[in-house]
Amino acid sequence: MSTNVYVDGLNLYYGSLRNTPFRWLDISALCSALLPGRTIKRIRYFTARVVSLPHDKTAPTRQDIYLRALRTLPNLTIHDESRFAARVVLYPQYPLAYINNQQDKLPNRVQVQRLEEKRSDVNLASWLLDDFFSKDFDDAVVVSNDSDLTTPIEIITTKYHKNVGIINPQHKSKLSRELDKAATFSMQTINKRVLVNCQFPPTLTDVKGTFTKPLSW
C-alpha cells in the first residue's frame, strides 16, 4: 500500500519547530519515522513565502535555503503559491491594570501590523482531493492541526471510506476535535526525539552545488 503525506508547513513550523534547534528538518525522514512500515509514495509540502520584517530581515533567505534542502528529497513536492498579506489593525492593549483585576481602566488601543497567511489550507485540501479522485494513493496522512481541513478529510473518510490519518504538530492538548473525529486515526503530537533524529546533515549538495544550514539556526 502506498501513502501520500500532505504537510502544512507553517502549522508544523509554529507547532513543533519555532524557537527550537530542529528547524533543519528532513521531512522525508520525519514521515518514515512517524509512519513505519508504510511506503511513502509522495510528500506534498505546503507553505507561504515569508516576508522581510525590520526585526528579521534575513528570514526569506533562510527559508530559501531550507526549501533548497527540501528539493533534494526525490519524493517531495513544494507548493509555495501561498502568500502573507500584511495589514495594519488596532488592538486593545493588555494593561497591567487588567492583570491586577482593576478592570475599571479601559485598555488603550495600539496599532499593530498583522500578517495573515493566505491559501495554504485551500491548496492542501485541493491537492488531497485531487490525488484521491485520481487514485494516486491507497491512504493519506495530513500533518496539520488546522480544523479548516476537516471537511475534505471527512469527505474522503466518511463518504468514500478511504483512510486519512492526522499527525498533530502541536501540543497534544491542542489536538482539533473536528480533525480527530474526521480522521481514520490521529497521532497526538510529534516527539522531540523524532525531531532530533530527523535533521538534514549540515552540508548538502544539489545540482547547483554545495550549501549549508543557515548559521542563525
Image: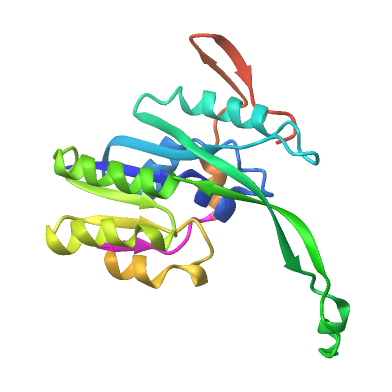
Q: Which residues are magenta?
A: 183-191
Residue appearing at x 53%, y 28% in the figure: 67
Task: Say which of 20 and 131 sits in front.
Answer: 131
Placement of 96 over or under 38, stated as above or below = below
Placement of 152 over or under 179, stated as above or below = above
The picture places residue 196, in percent across and down from the top left corner, at: 57, 44
Colouring: rainbow
The picture places residue 28, in percent across and down from the top left corner, at: 41, 36
Quick check: 146 left or right of 2? right
Q: Quadrant of the N terminus?
A: top left
Quick check: 194 left or right of 139? right
Q: Quadrant of the C terminus?
A: top right
The picture places residue 41, in percent across and down from the top left corner, at: 26, 34
Residue appearing at x 46%, y 24% in the figure: 71
Q: Can residue 63 be spotted in the picture?
A: yes
Residue appearing at x 33%, y 62% in the figure: 150
Residue 187 magenta-highlighted: yes
Which quadrant of the figure has residue 133?
Answer: top left
Residue appearing at x 51%, y 49% in the figure: 12
Quick check: 106 left or right of 169? right
> Looking at the image, how many numbered discs can be counted on the residues?
0
Placement of 64 over or under 195, stated as above or below = above
Q: Can residue 2 be spotted in the picture?
A: no
The picture places residue 201, in percent across and down from the top left corner, at: 57, 27
Task: Say which of 199 and 45 sits in front.
Answer: 45
Q: Main secondary structure of the magenta part?
A: loop
Placement of 83 over or under 155, stated as above or below = above
Residue 132 magenta-highlighted: no
